Image (cartoon, rainbow, N blue to C red):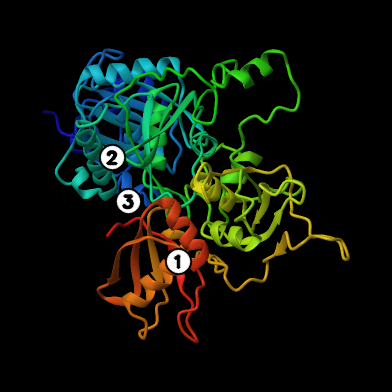
Amino acid sequence: MKRPFSENPHATPSSLANLPDEEMHQIQRGSDELLAQTGAVSNGSVMSPAPNHADNNNDAKKVKLDTKNPGAPSRVIHIRNIPNEVTEAEIVHLGIPFGKVTNVLVLKGKNQAFLEMSDEVSATTMVNYFTNCTAQLRGRAVYVQFSNHKELKTDQTHSNAQNPSAQAALQAAQALVNQTDTQGGPNTVLRVIVEHMIYPVTLDVLYQIFSRVGKVLKIVTFTKNNTFQALIQYPDVVTAQAAKMTLDGQNIYNACCTLRIEYSKLSNLNVKYNNDKSRDYTNPNLPTGDPALDSALAIGAPNLNLPNRTGENATPTGMPFTGMPLAGVTPTAAALGAAGIRLPGQPSPNCVLLVSNLNEEMVTPDALFTLFGVYGDVQRVKILFNKKDNALVQMSEPHQTQLAISHLDKMKTWGKQIRVTLSKHQTVQLPKEGQPDAGLTKDYSNSPLHRFKKPGSKNYQNIYPPSATLHLSNIPPTVDEEQIKDAFAHAGANVKAFKFFPKDRKMALIQLGSVEEAIAALIKMHNFQLSDSSHLRVSFSKSTI
C-alpha cells in the first residue's frame, strides 16, 4: 500500500488527479496550498486537515482509501455540504435506516463526511433513496453519493477508538441493529407504548408530538395488556427513524407518560375510520364509524359535536413534553396547547363536566365532590334544579376532566350507570343572592380536602380506576382492624378482606364485595373521623388482598 501523501517525497498534487469531481469539489485549492498541508491522503484521497490547525484538531485523521472508478457502487458513501457543527452521530443516523453502519469519518473543516455501510446493497439503497429525496442535516441540504473508495480505513493512531464521539455513534448504531433483530426492521411504521400514563394521552396529543419530526400519515391507537399503545406511520423510513431516535424515552409530561418506541412489523396501516381511536390524515373523508354521525355529516348538519381534534383538554399543566424543538419546525398553537402552553387570545380549555343518569335519591354535591375529587380538585358542583339526575362538576384543570371521564364514565354508581362528558359550559355559576337553590350548588374552591393542591403532587402517581379494593391512609395508631371494618360495615359496605401495610400501620387495604360497593364506601368514608385529630383518607387501589 502506498504511503500517505505527506510521507511520500515523490508525491505531487498531480496524484490527486484520480479524485472524482464529487470529492475534488470541496478540496481543490491550488497546488501551493495542497503542498503546504500535512494532512494524509492515500492514492489521492480526501485530505484531512493537519493536527496543528487549531480549528480542526478533532478532524486530524489519516485516511487510507483504495481508489476505484468514480460513480461505481461502493459501500462507502460520500456526503457533501454538511454544516460545520454536525456530529458523527448525525451522519450515522442518516445511514441507520438502510442497514448496518461500520465506520464514519467527519471532516468538519471541509464540510464533508464519509459513511461506510456493511455491504453495497445497503449503500445502494441509501444513495438511491436520497437521489429522489434530498437529505438534510440541521436544516441544510446535503448531497449523498457513492465514494470512489471501496473501504474506509483509519490508521491505528487516528482510529475511531481515539474519537469517543465516533465510537459512541457506531456503538449506538450497532445496538439499534441488535434491538431490531427481535422487532420489526426499520420501516415507516412505529409502535409506541406509553408507560406510567398518569395523565390521559389522546390520538391528537400523539399527532402533535410526532408531527414535530415530520409528516404523520396515519395513527391507530389501542390498549393491550392494560397499556395504551399506538401505531404511527410516516411517509419514509428516514423520518420514522428520526422520530424513534428523537422521541424514544422522552416524557410527554413531567416525570410520566414515557414514550417507548420500536419498529412495527407492519409496513402499512389500514385505517377504516377517522375518529378518536384512529385517523388517516391522507383521507379526511373516511367515516367515523358512528352511523348517526356519519349520516349527519353526509347531509351537512351544522353544530355537530365532533370528536375533539386538538387534544387541548388532555393536557396537564406543569412541565410539558421535554423533547428539544427540531430545527425548522415552528410549533403550532395546537401543539403548544398540547404542551400546556397557552397563547394570548387562545380560548381557555373546558374544565366543566356534565354528569348524567345519577340516582336522584342518593346524589348530593358533597358526594360528587368526594368521588370526582379522586381525579382532581373539584371547584364547584351544581345539581340541576329541574333535572336532578344531572349535575355539573367544575374541576381546577382541564386534564383533570379527562382523568374523570376516562375513569368514571359508564361506571355503575348507586345502582345506575352514570355518564360523564364535557359540558358546553365554561364555568359553574353560583346562584345569585336571594335566589332559591335548595343547596344544590356548592363552592369548594377553598376546601382543605383537595388532593392535588401542591404542584407536582405525588397523589398524581397514585390515580387508579375504581376497584373493589380501597387504599386507606392517615390511620392513627390507636385504631385497630376491627374498628375500621366496623366503620365500613356501618356505612353499608360488605368487607371481604383487610390488611395493614407491614411497614406502615398508618396505611391499609380493604377489599369490598364489588366495585360499586367500593365507590359508595369511598364517598361515605373519605374524611371519616377516626379520632379527635385524625380523618381517614380513602382512594382506589391497584392492588388486591
Secondary-structure class at tag 2:
loop
Q: Amino acid at mark 1?
A: Val
Q: Give the mark nearest the N terminus, 2 or 1.
A: 2
Task: Determine contact: label 1, label 3, CB under 8 Å.
Answer: no
Q: Amino acid at mark 2?
A: Gly
Q: What residue is rendered at 35% in x and 24% in y?
A: 23
Q: Give the mark nearest the N terminus, 1 or 3.
A: 3
The residue carrying mark 3 is: 52
Q: What is the quadrant of residue 75 in the picture?
A: top left
Q: CA distance from mark 3 to mark 2?
A: 10 Å
Q: Is residue 545 above or below residue 293?
A: below
| Depth order, front residue of 271/161 | 271
Task: Determine contact: label 2, label 1, CB under 8 Å.
Answer: no
The residue carrying mark 1 is: 538
Q: Mark 2 vs mark 1: give the one in front.
A: 1
- Locate residue 369, reporting x and y percent: 60, 61
Q: Give the mark nearest the N terminus, 3 or 2.
A: 2
Q: Is residue 127 left or right of residue 446?
A: left
Secondary-structure class at tag 1:
strand
- Check disc 1: other Cα within 10 Å, few if <14, some if 14-19, many if 20+: many
Q: Say the numbered circle drawn on residue 39.
A: 2
Q: Is residue 319 above or below residue 206?
A: below
Quarter of the picture containing the C terminus is bottom left
- Locate residue 397, reporting x and y percent: 62, 55
Q: Amino acid at mark 3?
A: Asn
- Locate residue 440, reporting x and y percent: 73, 59
Q: What residue is rendered at 34% in x and 34% in y?
A: 93
Q: How many marks?
A: 3
Q: Is residue 348 left or right of residue 411?
A: right
